Image (tube, rainbow, N blue to C red):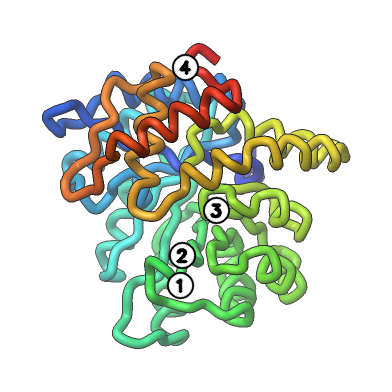
Amino acid sequence: MSNDEFLTGIYNITPTPFTEDGAFDEASMRRLVDFMVDCGVDGLTILGVLGEAGKVSEVERDRIIETVVDAASDRLPICVGTTHAATGQCIAYSKRAQELGAKAVMIAPPKLARSNDAALRRHYLAVAGAIDLPIVVQDHPASSGAYMSVDFIASLAEEAPSCRFLKLEDEPAPPKVSRVLAANSDIRVFGGLGGMMFLEELRHGAVGTMTGFAFPEILVEIHRKFVAGDVDGATALFYRYCPLIRFENQALINLPLRKEIYRRRGVIASACARAPFTPLDGDTLADLTDLLKRLQLTEEA
């Protein structure tokens, strides 16, 4: 597969498994990669927010990337989150990801005291000029504090073609998908936000989604049905699992919920997240159990 053709479809935003004492769990990481291959995803995005990138050391970053790239082999392309507040460090992270075998990087805007298009443009262009990988621009103002206008996104993609990939998480997302594509039809837009608007994003022209939903095979099937022209089938499947998508994407506990689901599915050994994090209470765990049973998504399934 040449250039950037692989950037389409379902990319799982993959968590970083830790042992009960907080150490990186390489065995679980390798099982997680094999699991994603079996689910039929098109790629993995690691070391994003769900991957707890801000809670790992420089040495651990390398080890995580090396483990995932080695486990994936030629079966899946790996996109690595390389966001950093400093342009120089973002470049260093991105170069290192390329050296270790990443096929793309995902970069959110650096946090600025005040949103500044010129500063954001310099940041992305500097990184684009330093590496030979596609850059997935993450548009999530709720976490970055930076609002990127449609004009900014379109002009950045025109000036730096390697930046023509967008993970759009600026709500409401579906209308912005349409506006971005109207401004620059060469941009490939991925949805996000836990998959909550996945169907609508596809209808508005998105090529797929990058999300951490812990039943990625469901998103794969929705996408396959949609691109095959079975919109009714894709819609029915999406509506069936919307309650779980909504439940899993709760603010503050979406990470521990997803890890708990992967643990129940036998993919990772522990649902442990690194402190600080919000642990799941007994009632939430009971709600999860009830929901999975009602949707007939048992651990065995």
Residue type, mark 3 in image: Gly
Query: The residue tagged with tag 4: helix, strand or loop?
Result: loop
Percent coordinates x, y for residue 103 in the rendering: 49, 43
Residue named by callout 1: 125
Which disc, if any, is residue 128?
A: 2
Query: The residue tagged with tag 3: helix, strand or loop?
Result: loop
Closest to the observer, 9 or 300: 300
The mark closer to the camera, 1 or 4, is 4
Residues at circles 1 and 2 in contact by the CB criterion of under 8 Å: yes
Residue type, mark 4 in image: Glu
The mark closer to the camera, 2 or 3, is 3
The mark closer to the camera, 2 or 4, is 4
Residue 275 position (above or below residue 170): above
As measured in the structure, the alpha-carbon distance from the residue carrying label 2 to the one carrying label 3 is: 23 Å
Residue type, mark 1 in image: Leu
Residue 142 position (above or below residue 267): below
For label 1, the crowd category at 10 Å Cα-Cα, with few meaning under 14, some 14 to 19 and many 20 or more, is some
Percent coordinates x, y for residue 200 in the rendering: 72, 55
As measured in the structure, the alpha-carbon distance from the residue carrying label 3 to the one carrying label 1 is: 24 Å
As measured in the structure, the alpha-carbon distance from the residue carrying label 4 to the one carrying label 3 is: 25 Å
Which disc, if any, is residue 299?
A: 4
Residue named by callout 3: 192
Q: Earlier in the sequence, mark 3 or mark 1?
A: 1
Residue 39 position (above or below residue 259): above
